[in-house]
Amino acid sequence: MSTLSTHVLDTATGRPAAGLAIMLEKQPDPAAWKTYCQSRLAGEDSHKPSWETLAKGVTNSDGRCPGLLADGTRLAPGVYRMDFDTAGYFAQQGLSGFYPLVQVIFEIQAQDEHYHVPLLLSPYGFSTYRGS
């Protein structure tokens, strides 16, 4: 089982993105979800699998969300999604941005690795990668 962390940095200010709401979800049927995505991209109609909410949290003053998962929580291999409420974050700054929500979908494959999902954001762009 794997552990998970995130860190959000506001590249427009050069500072951590504090107060940003995050939600972590798991796809209960990854094969059906992948089939749905392929069908949709091919212009076909397909059943849309639902996601299971695992946790919700808010980033701290360092842009991290250490309490997103309870201590000792480990994630099984599978497909996961992190939603970052960028509209809410930028509204707190008195700004509006182009991307109201950033969804990062990733797949945990190795059982005993740590997965880090950093997000770099600004009002008009974002970037993510698998961190360490």
Image: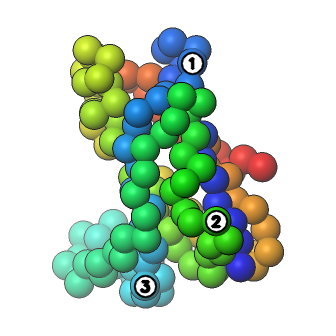
Q: Residue at x 45, y 56 (%)?
A: 82
In the rendering, at what x and y percent does residue 5 appear?
63, 53
First-in-chain label (1 vs 3): 1
Q: Residue at x 80, y 75 (%)?
A: 112
- Looking at this rendering, what residue extends furthest in the left direction? 45
Disc 2 vs disc 1: which is toward the camera? Answer: 2
Q: Label 2 vs label 3: CA separation?
A: 22 Å
Amino acid on which disc 2 is placed = Asp
First-in-chain label (2 vs 1): 1
The secondary structure type at the circle numbered 2 is loop
Q: Which residue is mark 2?
A: 71
First-in-chain label (2 vs 3): 3
**Residue 1 shows in this picture:** yes
**Residue 37 shows in this picture:** no
Q: Is residue 121 left or right of residue 36?
A: right
| Quadrant in the picture for the N terminus | bottom right
Q: Which residue is mark 1?
A: 15
Q: Is residue 2 above or below residue 91?
A: below
Q: Which residue is mark 3?
A: 28
Residue density around tag 3, few if under 14, some if 14–19, many if 20 or more, within 10 Å: some
Amino acid on which disc 1 is placed = Arg
Amino acid on which disc 3 is placed = Pro
Image mark for residue 66: none
Q: Is residue 91 above or below residue 107?
A: above
Residue density around tag 2, few if under 14, some if 14–19, many if 20 or more, within 10 Å: few
In the rendering, at what x and y percent does residue 21 appear?
37, 44
